[in-house]
Amino acid sequence: MKIFKNTSVTKGYKNSVLAIGNFDGVHVGHKKVLNAAYKKAKEIKKKFGLLTFEPVPVMFFNKKIINHRLDTLPQKISNLKNKKLDFVIIQKFNRRFSKLSYQDFIYKVLHKEIKCKYLYVSKNFKFGNKREGNVSKLKKFEKKLFYKTIITPPLTKKKKTISSTIIRKLLKRGEIKKANYLLNRKWEVIGKVVKGSQRGRKIGFPTCNILLKKYVIPKFGVYAVNVKIDRLLKKGIANVGYRPTFNGKKLLLEVNIFGIKKNLYNKNINVIFNKFIRPEKKFKNIIELKDQIKKDIKLAK
């Protein structure tokens, strides 16, 4: 899978079948669109590609939206690798690109730079300066610029459209199993272990602390997790929140990894969410907290 850092693709990747979108989470709904685009590419014997934007446009336009993403860019690329793509274009979404008129996006980007033959988008796809471009405007230029716009019907379950927004809502409600089902994999957070107050160590349950950064914040509470450290996979429990028993001020993902006692500071680890155990709670004292942690560990094992 070839990665392009902008829309100026090389000759061998022009005249392609192209899917456009954020593809945050690369969930089962995205998979339906990508499968349809892949079949078309095979049918007409053309390259199959994807155009996505970095950062996610909604985060670019609204700086107050910080914790939003289901995955990081490296995770997205990794999740796309088994989707039979020939190439992925990661277009930097900056002020200059956001000011591009919808006509220039169609003519300069889609026609001149990428020269796509089939274009797969969602029915509510918006593009160009002030989001003035839409599906009807894409269709308007089809004959003149020799491409075809395809709108794949969204994947629905129980009359609800599967979307990244729905998965974010599930995570915020602690409905991990439902979110994992729609992702067709287990949701995971990858982050560097940072030094904390070491209270966990003092009470007999050492934790690795990770900042959630731009990830969506799941429901505060305790989760059963798997933790990947290099090639090693271990079970554990994780707490998302502020540690109210200790009057914590900083939002953290704290992970107690079963069977690991070595120092993991500054090491990147993958925290894979399996199920929600209980909401975060302020305990009266350390003894009560320790008793609850023991119960949590039994439920996670």
Image (tube, rainbow, N blue to C red):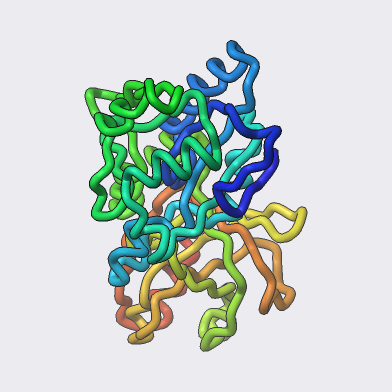
Residue 14 percent location from the top left of the image: 61, 32
Whether residue 70 is visible to the viewer of this picture, yes or no, is yes
Quarter of the N terminus within the rendering: top right
Residue 170 percent location from the top left of the image: 32, 46
Whether residue 278 is visible to the viewer of this picture, yes or no, is no
In the figure, residue 87 lies in which quadrant?
Answer: top right
- Position of residue 20 in the picture relative to residue 75 (left or right): left
Residue 257 percent location from the top left of the image: 62, 64
Which of the two residues, 296 or 234, is positioned nearer the viewer here?
234
In the figure, residue 5 lies in which quadrant?
Answer: bottom right
Q: Is residue 164 above or below residue 111?
A: below
Residue 93 percent location from the top left of the image: 44, 59
Residue at left 37%, top 38%?
178
Residue at left 45%, top 56%?
223
Which of the two residues, 75 or 136, is positioned nearer the viewer here?
136
Which of the two residues, 164 or 117, is positioned nearer the viewer here?
117
Which residue is farthest top?
43
